[in-house]
Amino acid sequence: DKEIIDTELQLKDLETIESRLAKEQKAAAAGNKEAKVNTTVLTAYKEVLEQGKNARIVSFESKEEQQAAHDLFLLTAKPVMYVCNVDETAAKDGNEFTRKIEALAKEEGAEIMVIAAKTEEDIADYTPEEKREFLAEIGIEATGLDNLIKASYTLLGLISFLTDGKKECRAWTIRRGTKAPQAAGKIHSDI
């Protein structure tokens, strides 16, 4: 399934690149500096995608190239997390299939998470204390859902900004590194 999805996304990215590359090459030949940077980025991505690899494995040195790469919004350049559903016995250490996905994820700089969805479903209605006891029995520290949320926030560079008042305590999602005044602006714009 991963290979089929990757191929479809790579083809879409190639279509995006090819539609822009000729135009950028003409502008670069005319001396446009921005077009030269764009041509370099597009060419690097095209070479990787034509090899059947995802754009996320390409890295750029200069700020201009990094910005040009970001502005393309390629599907295979987006951060990825592979979530593998396993049975309860493989929830802690995975299995032969998760190890294959782990090797592929490492190669392309992606994340992997192993979850036993059936177990998650079974413990969904447990009290917090019952959950802790059950997880301790099977040797896991937190639920797969809790781990998935934390890993997703990390992958996307997000954190929660907490506000507390007389009526409510609330968590707001903001980018990691956001200063308090900008976080407050996010809160007020959401209101």
Image: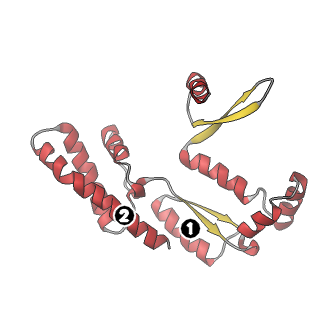
Identify whether 121 is placed above or below 158: below
Quarter of the image holding residue 116?
bottom right
Residue lying furthest left = 30
The Cα–Cα distance between marks 2 and 1, rounded to whole angstroms, is 20 Å
Identify whether 33 is placed above or below 77: above
Q: How is the image coloured?
A: secondary structure
* Residue 92 at least partly seen: no
Q: Which one is earlier in the sequence, the residue at label 2 or at label 1? A: 2
Measuring from the top left, give residue 13's x and y in whole percent: 34, 59
Measuring from the top left, give residue 177's x and y in whole percent: 56, 33
Q: Residues within 10 Å of mark 2 (few under 14, many from 20)?
A: many
Amino acid beneath label 2:
Gln
Q: Which residue is mark 2?
A: 10
* Residue 148 at least partly seen: yes
Q: Which residue is mark 1?
A: 102
The residue that appears at 59% across and 30% down in the rendered structure is: 190
The residue that appears at 50% across and 73% down in the rendered structure is: 1
Identify whether 122 is placed above or below 45: below
Measuring from the top left, give residue 22's x and y in whole percent: 17, 53
